[in-house]
Image (cartoon, rainbow, N blue to C red):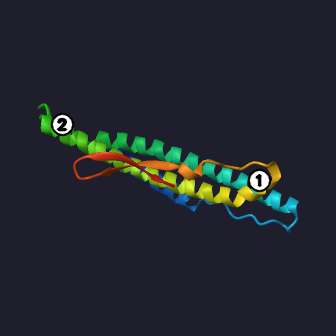
């Protein structure tokens, strides 16, 4: 049992390290070497490449965190005592399922907040990049931000409701 507890602590520690690393990742602003059209275009291209690389790193970290959280849940289940031999009452079953649903809703809302943050960052990059991109390629870089929404769950105390907010 002590070994499992140590493994749980190691997983939690690694998750925290990954979250800290994720929070520090940002694409740095790349300024053109001069004001020539070529230098401006190259600076925006480098900015877009770096933003894509940072986004890929963040996605990899998020996937690692998700895998570690699944492993953590498995280890925590191993520590839990065996369920009682008596079958659960209907009320107990409903209460347990309700708690699991609220746990999932909380995780969905955390992911919704992260997704909204990433979309806002992408929108800011696109806003900065679009004039140059339009000049260079004659088309917009990204479209569709006007009606972008993110689903989340809310509760009136008894009922969970799926809603969405516009980005």
Q: Are marks 1 and 2 in contact (CB under 8 Å)?
A: no
Q: Residue at x 81, y 55 (%)?
A: 135
Residue 144 location, x and y as percent? 60, 48
The tag on residue 151 is none
Q: Few, some or many C-alpha atoms within 10 Å of disc 1 (few <14, some 14-19, many ≥20)?
A: few
Residue 56 location, x and y as percent? 62, 47
- Name the side, left or right, on which 33 lies relative to 78: right
Of labels 1 and 2, the one closer to you: 1
Residue 157 location, x and y as percent? 23, 52
Closer to the N terminus: mark 1 or mark 2? 2
- Specify whether residue 144 is in view: yes
- The residue pinned by badge 2 equals 93
Q: Secondary structure at mark 2?
A: helix
Q: Secondary structure at mark 1?
A: helix
Q: Residue at x 38, y 48 (%)?
A: 163
- The residue pinned by badge 1 equals 134
- Name the side, left or right, on which 35 lies relative to 64: right
Q: Residue at x 48, y 54 (%)?
A: 166
Quadrant of the rendered structure where residue 80 is?
top left
């Amino acid at each position: 049992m002590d070994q499992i507890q140590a493994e749980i602590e190691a997983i939690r520690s690694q998750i925290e390290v990954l979250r800290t690393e994720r929070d520090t990742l940002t694409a740095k602003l790349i300024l053109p070497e001069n004001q020539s059209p070529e230098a401006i275009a190259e600076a925006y291209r480098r900015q877009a490449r770096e933003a894509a690389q940072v986004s890929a790193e963040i996605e990899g970290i998020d996937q690692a965190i998700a895998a570690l959280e699944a492993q953590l849940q498995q280890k925590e289940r191993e520590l839990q005592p065996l369920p009682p031999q008596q079958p659960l009452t209907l009320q107990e079953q409903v209460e347990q399922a309700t708690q699991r649903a609220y746990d999932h809703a909380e995780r969905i809302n955390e992911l919704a907040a992260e997704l909204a943050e990433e979309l806002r960052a992408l929108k800011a990059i696109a806003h900065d990049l679009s004039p140059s991109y339009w000049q260079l390629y004659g088309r917009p870089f990204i479209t569709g931000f006007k009606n972008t929404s993110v689903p989340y769950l809310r509760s009136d105390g008894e009922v969970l409701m799926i809603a969405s907010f516009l980005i």
